[in-house]
Image: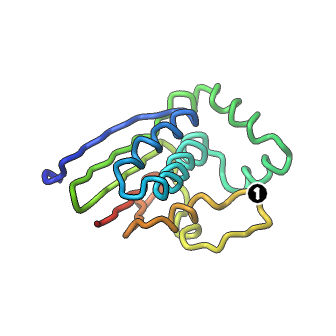
């Protein structure tokens, strides 16, 4: 990737950092407002589902019980979660953008979720769908499902 003019590397741990980093990264893409939401959802998922290991079904249950925020705070304070980071890289030139987001979780069965129809009766499950509907030319996951790379050509 030597022909890339811009290289950015970030490491974050908290949801507060997700918003700010998403704003920064989105402004490197054409139509930043459109890409902000997709980038935000992917990084948020890396923190929540990856590093904090709050799975889809568990999140559904926690949201319905009004306990999601309490569980997130509890996990952020636990030794096995509090030091985990999400690594975010952006490599770009005038024609291509590669955004890679990697968490320190165990991964997830991404093939089951990518392209899945949104169940509007559930309080969650839209993040990957939102990211997929962005104008990325390609979204790929590593085998484990704890790293995603989004590519866009201009």
**Which residue is the extreme one toward the right?**
65
The residue beneath circle 1 is 123
Q: Position of residue 37 (x, y in %)?
A: 53, 54
Q: Secondary structure at mark 1?
A: loop
- Judge from the rendering whether residue 110 lies leftward or rightward of residue 58; answer left or right: left
- Tell me the quadrant of the picture where the C terminus can be found: bottom left
**92 displayed left or right of 32:** left
On the image, the x and y values in percent for residue 78 come to 63, 27
Residue sitting nearer the eye, 29 or 50: 29
Q: Residue at x 51, y 56 (%)?
A: 38
Crowd class of label 1 (few under 14; some 14 to 19; many from 20; radius 10 Å): few
Residue lying farthest left?
Answer: 2
Q: Nearer the viewer, residue 24 or 71?
A: 24
Task: Count numbered badges in the picture.
Answer: 1
Seen at 58% across and 65% down, the residue is 129
- Residue 40's spot in the image, x, y percent? 52, 49
- Identify the residue at image location x=77%, y=62%: 122
Give the colour scheme shown.
Answer: rainbow
139 to the left or right of 60: left
Quarter residue 118 falls in: bottom right
Position of residue 42 in the picture relative to residue 125 (left or right)? left
Residue at 34 percent across and 45 percent down: it is 89
């Amino acid at each position: 990737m030597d022909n890339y003019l811009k290289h950015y590397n970030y490491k974050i741990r908290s949801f507060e950092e997700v918003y700010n980093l998403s704003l920064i990264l989105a402004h490197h893409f054409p139509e930043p407002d459109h890409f902000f939401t997709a980038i935000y959802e992917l990084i948020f998922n890396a923190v929540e589902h990856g590093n904090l290991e709050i799975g889809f079904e568990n999140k559904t249950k926690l949201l319905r019980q009004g306990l999601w925020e309490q569980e997130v705070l509890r996990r952020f304070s636990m030794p096995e979660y509090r030091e985990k980071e999400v690594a975010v890289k952006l490599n770009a030139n005038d024609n291509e953008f590669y955004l890679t987001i990697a968490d320190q979780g165990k991964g997830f069965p991404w093939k089951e979720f990518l392209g899945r129809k949104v169940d509007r009766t559930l309080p969650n499950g839209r993040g990957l769908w939102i990211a997929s509907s962005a104008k990325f030319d390609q979204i790929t996951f590593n085998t484990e499902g704890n790293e995603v790379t989004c590519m866009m050509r201009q």
